Amino acid sequence: DQQVKQNSPSLSVQEGRISILNCDYTNSMFDYFLWYKKYPAEGPTFLISISSIKDKNEDGRFTVFLNKSAKHLSLHIVPSQPGDSAVYFCAARPTGNQFYFGTGTSLTVIP
Amino acid sequence: GAVVSQHPSRVICKSGTSVKIECRSLDFQATTMFWYRQFPKQSLMLMATSNEGSKATYEQGVEKDKFLINHASLTLSTLTVTSAHPEDSSFYICSAPDGTNTEAFFGQGTRLTVV
């Protein structure tokens, strides 16, 4: 049972434009959310996180939005750069240590 | 930031042999580590939770006798794929939450190919 879902397996965006990656979750007990970036044959690297007490967190070109009522979060990258091309995973956890991951969205930024 | 080191990054082994993958937390202690497996074009699937000083907790469908996990110290967890078969070929990744549980740090991953 996939508790964290990323319904778009891939996304292509022109360089300089905004990339929006979406993530939905089913478990209302999730209280912390993260986005990871992954290049082929490497482990995921942390990108940005948000606590359930917030609805927005911003770090440079990356902003994560959380809509708790809709159980939805999104990652905005603006402006998108070719180096942003990677697979992006969202992750969520309830109180405790275990993180649940989405299926990933492969982002391609076209120069 | 905290670093998790995973070794080896790539391994090719013959069918029927065993392979050990190490996961180390380099500058923090990890009482818990997680082992994931990723199939092509799929998400990271949690295989098991490694607990320092006690038995690992396996997810449903993961064979305990095939994927042996040992968490002998606060900085090292190992995953041993026993009697490997070609269908075990995959990308294995470990992770450890930091002390404040605000982030999970990942190893670099191990590409296992069983021939």
Image (tube, coloured by chain):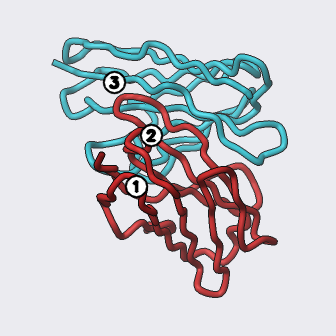
**As rendered, which of B111 and B68 lies closer to the eye?**
B111
Residue occupied by mark 1 = A104
Check disc 1: other Cα within 10 Å, few if <14, some if 14-19, many if 20+: many
Chain letter of the red region: A
Q: Residue B105 sits in which quadrant?
A: top right
Residue at image point 36% right, 41% down = B38
- The disc placed on residue B34 is none
Residue at image point 54% right, 68% down = A74
- A73 on left or right of B1: left
Q: Position of residue A42 (x, y in %)?
A: 43, 29
Mark 2 touches mark 1? (CB < 8 Å): yes
- B29 on left or right of A72: right
Label 2 or label 1, whichever comes before in sequence order = 2
Label 3 to label 2, Cα distance in Å? Answer: 14 Å
Label 2 to label 1, Cα distance in Å? Answer: 9 Å
How many numbered marks have been drawn onto this rendered protein structure? 3
Residue occupied by mark 2 = A38
Chain that bears disc 2 = A
Residue B99 higher or lower than A99, as above or below: above
Q: Position of residue B101 (x, y in %)?
A: 78, 46
Residue B21 higher or lower than B101, as above or below: above
Residue occupied by mark 3 = B111
User: Residue extending furthest left?
Assistant: B115
Check disc 2: other Cα within 10 Å, few if <14, some if 14-19, many if 20+: some
Element under disc 3: strand
Residue at image point 75% right, 29% down = B30
Labels 2 and 1 share a subunit = yes
Label 3 to label 1, Cα distance in Å? Answer: 19 Å
Three-letter amino acid code at the position of disc 2: Lys
Three-letter amino acid code at the position of disc 1: Gly
- The hue of chain B in the figure is cyan
Mark 3 touches mark 1? (CB < 8 Å): no
